[in-house]
Amino acid sequence: MFEKLHTRNGKKFLLCVALVFVVALSVIGKATFGGVVDEYNMPMSEWSVSMYFMQSAWVLIYTLMFTIIGSLPFGFYFLGETDKHH
């Protein structure tokens, strides 16, 4: 499997995974942190360290899950078997 990642299509796949990760991180981070600020009317300057830790943990977990799910189509496209029978 690691040999496929060193190919041209493997590098394109890794670029797509990184792009999906950045998009998921920005969307989920905004929704999570912004949601707490909006819902509880509590600015981030009043948060405790444990609140930052818990919200960051949720953002990381959800970002990883959405990255895995969002990268599946790119994996099939870039790393799947090529059809040589035209």
Image (cartoon, rainbow, N blue to C red):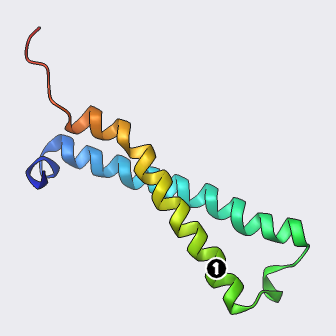
Residue at image coords 71%, 83%: 51
Percent of width and height locating residue 25: 55, 60
Percent of width and height locating residue 80: 20, 33
Q: Amino acid at mark 1?
A: Met
Percent of width and height locating residue 59: 58, 67
Asked whether 39 or 46 is in front, the reply is 39
Residue at image coords 78%, 86%: 47
Residue at the top extreme? 86
Percent of width and height locating residue 56: 60, 75
Residue at image coords 86%, 66%: 38
Where residue 31 sits, quadrant-wise, is bottom right
- Look at the picture and state if 81 lies above or below 46: above
Residue at the bottom extreme? 49
Asked whether 34 or 80 is in front, the reply is 80
Mark 1 Cα-neighbour bin, 10 Å: few <14, some 14–19, many ≥20: few
19 sits to left or right of 56: left
24 sits to left or right of 64: right
- Say which residue label 1 marks: 54
- Look at the picture and state if 29 lies above or below 19: below
36 sits to left or right of 22: right
Q: Secondary structure at mark 1?
A: helix
Residue at the right extreme? 41
82 sits to left or right of 51: left
Q: Which quarter of the rendered picture does the C terminus lie within?
A: top left
